[in-house]
């Protein structure tokens, strides 16, 4: 197959971008039309500025830990970076998530910068893919465990449904894992073969040192749990009272839903999923109506979107500052190899 046949079509990319952006705009418009604006505005006003600032600071702290985890994984793959270089590349990827249609775009930019700085482009791409896969695995495990805990405690039909859903999710994860590792590459659709091959290569490289893989997975669970705790802090300001397992369940599944390639960075889709999943699990000691609970859950998710944007902008400021202070390479200098 020639290069022209495999080259990406720019027009097709722009069409996909426009469709995703339009889908997010349509969902957000429908939510605002469904939920009275004055109720959303009242819910936003209940979040103290201090709590919002603390949430942004916690978000950045979690991603500072994420720098360490990502650097460890890509280093195991062969792309070794100095700590300052890792911060610069990671900050660039986090910042670009605002403008690119999904977090995968941020991962690509982060990997490209890491590949140039380390001199090992393939290792940076494979290591970054392994890190993202481990993060998704962490989210899936959190959703399964939390869903089981919530289901065992819930009353009525909701509880058994959650337990059955958790068991089906675990079974599906096992089937997907077997398919990925056992199915011959030539049996996959041609469009997926390259991605599947990269994924398998990333897994095999990480499998050479299982302790690094386990440490990264544990780090991913710790990082995602901390982010859930920050979201719950916003929820407490909105009088959303729910057990930790409910927050973990709704937040993890909503984030996974936001990764589906149907919207722009999950905006609208993630917020709707979170509100729908979370409202039935709220204790509602304040005696709020169902509509008010949905409004406040939606407001909590929208506030989190604001935290993501502000945190990503601050990451962009860090990236630009580090770029300006970075020493220029001398003419004819070669890329460093680790």
Image (spheres, rainbow, N blue to C red):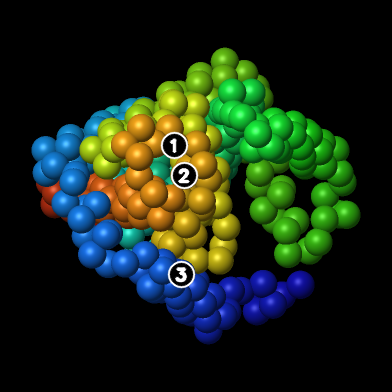
Q: How crowded is mark 3: few (under 14 residues within 10 Å), some or many (20 or more)?
A: some
Query: Are circles 3 and 2 on residues that touch, CB within 8 Å?
Result: no
Q: In which quarter of the image is the N terminus?
A: bottom right
Front of the two marks 3 and 2: 2
Residue 100 locus on image (x, y percent): 40, 63
Which secondary structure, mark 2?
helix
Which residue is tagged 2? 279
Q: How far apart are marks 3 and 2 (CA)?
A: 19 Å
Give the vertical position of 261 relative to 299 (above or below). below
Front disc: 3 or 1 = 1
| Residue at the disc numbered 3 | 27
Height in image: 75 above or below 175?
Answer: above
Q: Are marks 1 and 2 in contact (CB under 8 Å)?
A: yes
Q: Name the residue under label 1.
A: 282
Q: Position of residue 172 (x, y in %)?
A: 77, 39
How far apart marks 3 and 1 lie (CA) works out to 24 Å
Does label 3 or label 1 sit earlier along the sequence? 3
Q: Residue at x 82, y 42 (%)?
A: 179
Q: Residue 115 carries which label?
A: none
Kindly report the distance in space between the C-alpha atoms of the residues bearing marks 1 and 2.
Answer: 5 Å
Disc 3, SS = helix
């Amino acid at each position: 197959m020639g290069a022209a046949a495999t080259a990406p079509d720019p027009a097709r990319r722009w069409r996909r971008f426009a469709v995703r952006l339009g889908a997010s705009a349509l969902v957000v418009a429908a939510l605002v039309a469904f939920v009275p604006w004055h109720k959303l505005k009242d819910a936003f006003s209940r979040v103290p500025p201090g709590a919002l600032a603390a949430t942004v600071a916690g978000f950045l702290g979690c991603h500072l830990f994420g720098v360490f985890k990502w650097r460890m994984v890509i280093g195991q793959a062969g792309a070794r970076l100095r700590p300052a270089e890792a911060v610069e590349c990671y900050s660039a990827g986090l910042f670009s998530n605002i403008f690119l249609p999904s977090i995968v775009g941020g991962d690509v930019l982060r990997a490209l910068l890491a590949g140039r700085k380390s001199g090992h482009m393939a290792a940076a791409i494979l290591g970054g893919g392994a890190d993202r896969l481990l993060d998704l695995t962490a989210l899936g495990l959190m959703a399964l465990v939390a869903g089981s805990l919530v289901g065992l405690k819930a009353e009525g039909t909701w509880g058994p449904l959650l337990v059955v859903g958790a068991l089906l999710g675990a079974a599906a994860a096992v089937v997907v894992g077997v398919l990925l590792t056992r199915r011959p590459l030539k049996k996959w659709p041609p469009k997926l073969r390259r991605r599947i091959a990269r994924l398998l290569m990333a897994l095999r490289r990480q499998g050479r040192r299982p302790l690094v893989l386990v440490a990264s997975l544990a780090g991913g669970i710790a990082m995602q749990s901390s982010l859930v705790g920050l979201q719950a802090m916003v929820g407490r300001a909105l009088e959303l009272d729910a057990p930790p397992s409910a927050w973990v369940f709704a937040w993890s599944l909503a984030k996974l839903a936001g990764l589906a390639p149907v919207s722009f960075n999950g905006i609208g889709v993630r917020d709707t999923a979170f509100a729908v999943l979370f409202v039935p699990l709220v204790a509602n000691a304040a005696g709020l109506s169902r509509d008010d609970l949905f409004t406040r859950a939606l407001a909590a998710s929208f506030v989190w979107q604001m935290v993501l944007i502000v945190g990503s902008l601050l990451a962009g400021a860090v990236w630009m500052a580090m770029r300006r202070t970075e020493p220029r390479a001398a003419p004819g200098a070669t890329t460093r190899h680790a």
